[in-house]
Amino acid sequence: MQTLGVISINLWQVLISLGNLVILFLLLKKFLYKPVTKMLANRQSELDARYKAAEEAERSAEEDRKIWSEKMDRADAEAEGILREASEKAGAKSERIVSEAKEKAREIMSRAEEEARLEYLKAQDDIKVEIVDLSTALAEKMLKREIKDEDHRELIRSFIDRMGDGDD
């Protein structure tokens, strides 16, 4: 039978290979695994910090939006109040202007009525003067001639006609 010399297992070689593997493992663990896990932990903490900052920024933005919304509501209410106040002032001013206009109209009407009354009185005085003048003229005509009944009636008719013409 043949010997299998080629496939033989050398215990020292296996132990040295295992020793090399353990040493390589320990070296990789010390110089590669720990720094890599440390770096990953640092990155994770940075990501956590960024997520926390983002959440905080989102919360802050929401609070700012609420504050802004409240300010806008207050501004709208204030604008509405200003418009209401301006409208009330305008209404009061228009009422004052209307009342002043009515007062001026009353003054104008009372002056016009007073002027009409004075014109009426003047017209009455003028009519009285005219009646006196006509009466005087009639009396002069009557005294200048002897009046017959027919002439007397004619004079009265003409006197009445002249008075009627003065009223128009």
Image: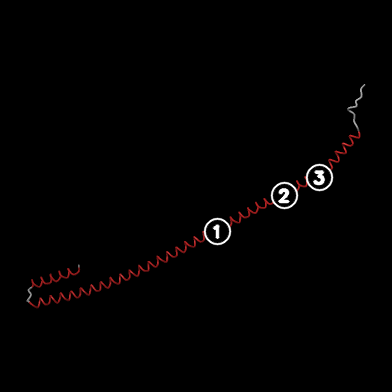
- Left or right placement of residue 45 versus residue 19 in this view: left
Q: Residues within 10 Å of mark 1 (few under 14, many from 20)?
A: few
> Where's the C terminus, which quadrant?
bottom left
Q: Residue furthest front?
A: 6
Q: Amino acid at mark 1?
A: Ala
Dot 2 or dot 1: first in sequence order is 2
> Which residue was labeled with disc 2?
46
**Where, by quadrant of the figure, is residue 134 drawn?**
bottom left
Residue in the image at 72% along x and 49% along y: 46
What residue is shown at x 55% (from left), y 58% (from top)? 75
Report x, y in % for residue 118.
Answer: 27, 73
How far from the left and from the top, in percent, is residue 32?
Answer: 80, 44
> Mark 3 belongs to which amino acid?
Phe
Residue 30 vs residue 162, the one in the foreground:
30
Q: Dot 3, crowdedness within 10 Å: few (<14), some or many (≥20)? A: few
The Cα atoms of the two marked residues, 3 and 1, are separated by 64 Å
Foreground residue, 168 or 28? 28
Its colouring scheme is secondary structure
Judged left or right of residue 31, residue 132 is left
Of circles 2 and 3, which is in front? 3
Residue that badge 3 annotates: 31
- Percent of width and height locating residue 90: 45, 63
Quadrant including the N terminus: top right
* Residue at horizontal 81 percent and vertical 45 percent from the top: 31
Q: Is residue 4 left or right of residue 150?
A: right
Check whether the beta carbons of the residues at disc 2 and disc 3 lie within 8 A of each other: no
Which disc is residue 75 wearing? 1
